[in-house]
Image (spheres, helix red, strand yellow):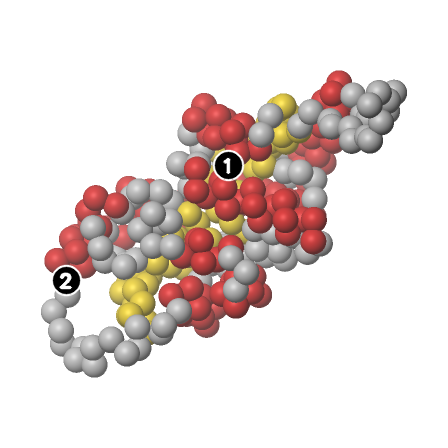
Amino acid sequence: MKTLVVPTDFSSVSVNALNYAVDMAQAINAGLVLLHVYNVPVSFTEAPVAPVTSVSLEEVKRSSMERLEELKKNLIILTSGKIQIYSESRLGEPIEELEAICKSLDPMAVIMGSHGTTGFERMIMGSTTLNAIKHIKCPVIVIPPGTTYNGIRKIGLACDFENVVQSTPVEYIKNIVKEFGADLYVLNVQDKMNAETDESEPPTMDAVYLDSMLEEVRPNYVQLTGKNVVESITSFAENNNLDLVMVIPKKHRFIDSLFHKSQSKELITHAHIPIVSIHE
């Protein structure tokens, strides 16, 4: 059975990502695994000895399990029991536990929010999501705030046509395109100053190899120009109603740019376009 893992801290941004995951799971008949990771409570005091007033570990554990169970019950009612929903509450560090559960389940994807609207949510979710993208080997779908699932009909693939044979996860790309019956757009960006004006220039060997590997899903190739890769791809995705944009973090630094404090980060947030990070 296809499985989607959804980490949650019960914040608004993680609830939004969960709603997206629920709708996707119903569309593709996948199961959901809800994951909440809690930490050991820490009490700060200036006194050398002080009474223990912080919440105990058992209380945190019980609260985590109760909130997850309540969330699970509500989702079962919402979906009329049409999808299988599991929940796990774990003690530890979020990325380590998420990585462990992914190794165990080999899910189709992890679905999580990019960052929240409050300062605290931006700090916590932004950091956790970026670390997940960097360290977790299974695909991670990042859902911007306010984004809802409306089907997956158009998928973009950001590609620089370098070392495509060794570094492009072709099978996953083909599987995800076929799963949703979507159109695939391979997006390449060249600097305006360096872009060739001669449209008859023959394709590179890497481009030829990629076309051969993706032949069965009939990709469309789009040449974009601009100094900012993130902005160029996001602008095309927004103007052409793409539903997902796939990126390969080790090939190009699209994801790093996305989460830095920059105009690019704000642009992708306002565009409400989910990003799928897939490793080589």
Secondary structure found at label 1: strand
For residue 194, side relative to residue 57 (left or right): left
For residue 169, side relative to residue 204 (left or right): right
At 51% across and 29% down in the image, what residue appears? 96
At 42% across and 29% down in the image, what residue appears? 106
Picture coordinates of residue 218 (x, y %)?
Answer: 25, 57
> Which residue lies under the disc numbered 2?
204
The answer to whether residue 176 of the structure is visible from this angle is no
At 49% across and 40% down in the image, what residue appears? 132
At 42% across and 47% down in the image, what residue appears? 277
| Quarter of the picture holding the C terminus | top left
Q: Quadrant of residue 186?
A: bottom left
Camera-side residue of 275 and 134 = 134
Nearest to N terminus: mark 2 or mark 1? 1
Query: Residue 198 — which label?
Result: none
C-alpha span from label 2 to label 1: 37 Å
Q: Residue furthest bottom?
A: 197
The answer to whether residue 265 of the structure is visible from this angle is yes
Tag 2: amino acid: Thr
